[in-house]
Amino acid sequence: MSSKPIGIFDSGAGGLSIWKEINKLMPHESTIYFSDSKYSPYGRKGQEYIIERSIKNTEFLISEGAKVIIVACNTATTNAIQVLRSKYDLPFVGIEPAIKPAALTSTTNAIGILATEGTLSSSLFHETSQRYTKNKVVIEQQGDGIVELIESGKIKSQEMKKLLKIYLAPMIKNNIDCLVLGCTHYSFLIPILKKYLPKRVKIIDSGYAVAKQTKKILENLNIINTSDNSFKKFYTNGSIVTITDLMGWKESKIIKTP
Ligand code: DGL
C-alpha cells in the first residue's frame, strides 16, 4: 500500500489525455503531472535530446515522491524508456502507437498512423510495426506542426484544419478503416478528426490501455493508495493557459516551474 503519487510527464499538455484516463480509472490515487512545454515539441529534436529531457522530467517527479512514472508521450517512450528503466529503480509505464489492435481490427487491411517524426523513426516503433502489419497497407504520416499549434492554443484554428486535411488525404485515398493516434496530443483532436474522416474509420488511441496497465502494476506491486487522502498536482514550465483552455480548468490549479 502506498499513498505516494503516480508521476506523469509529457513534452507538453498532450499527456493530460492519459491523466484523464488514469483519473477516471483510479480516482483515489494521487497524481503529479509535469508538462515540459518549454522544451516542446520533442518530435523532431533527435534521440539524445529526448533522453536528456526525459531524465530531467523523471528526476523532478522522483523528487516529488512518485511511486511509478508514466511516460505519457509516444516520442519519449519510443526513444527513451529503455534508458529510464535501466537508470532508475521504480516502474515505468510507456505509451506506443496501438498498431496491434488496429491490425487486428482492420477489415480493409489499410491502417493510418499519425505520429511524430521521433516516434515513426524509432527502432521500437519499427519492430512493432513489422511484427503486426505484414500483409497490411500502412500509411505513416508525420504530424509536423500539430503539437506546436496545440501548445500555442490554436487547436481549433484554420491552420490546424488545413494541416489535418493534408495529413488525412492519403489515408482516406488508401481506404483506411483504422487511424492510430501515435501522439498523446492528438487525442484532443478526436472531435475534429471525426469530422474529416469517413464514418467507417475507427480512431484508436492508447490512453485507456495505459491506465489499465498502470493499475495492474500498482496491484501487482501492492502499492495502491488505500488512504482516504489524495491530491492532484499539475506543473508546467510553459504556458498555464494552454492547459486551462484544453481542460476547462482554473489557472490556480496549475503550478508554474522555471
Ligand atoms: N505528446 C507527445 C507524443 O506523444 C508529443 C511529442 C512532441 O513533443 O513532439 O509523442
Image (spheres, rainbow, N blue to C red):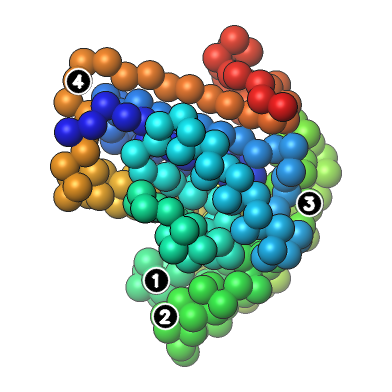
Q: Of discs 4 and 1, which sits in the foreground?
A: 4
| Residue pointed to by mark 4 | 227
Residue at image position (70%, 38%) is: 37
Q: Residues within 10 Å of mark 3 (few under 14, many from 20)?
A: some
Residue pictured at 75% horizontal, 61% vertical? 44
Q: Label 3: which residue?
A: 145
Labelled disc at residue 132: 2
Of 187 and 166, which appears nearest the observer? Answer: 187
What amino acid type is highlighted by mark number 3? Gly
Tell whether label 1 touches label 2 (CB within 8 Å).
Answer: yes
Q: CA distance from mark 2 to mark 4?
A: 42 Å
Question: Considering the numbered disc 1 on the image, is that residue within a helix, a strand or a loop?
Answer: helix
Q: CA distance from mark 3 to mark 4?
A: 43 Å
Left/right of residue 148 with respect to residue 198 in the rendered view? right
Instruction: Tell which circle, 3 or 4, labels the residue nearer the N-terminal end.
Output: 3
Q: Give the x, y percent position of residue 123.
A: 56, 77
Indicate the quadrant containing the N terminus: top left, top right, bottom left or bottom right. top left
Q: Amino acid at mark 1?
A: Lys
Q: Is residue 106 visible?
A: no
Toward the bottom, the furthest residue is 135
Query: Tag 2: residue type?
Result: Tyr
Instruction: State which tag comes first along the sequence, 4 or 1.
Output: 1
Q: Is residue 94 left or right of residue 38?
A: left
Q: Secondary structure at mark 2?
A: helix
Residue 97: x and y in percent read 50, 63
Above/below status of 138 relative to 193: below
Give the mark, 2 or 4, whose residue is nearer the N terminus: 2
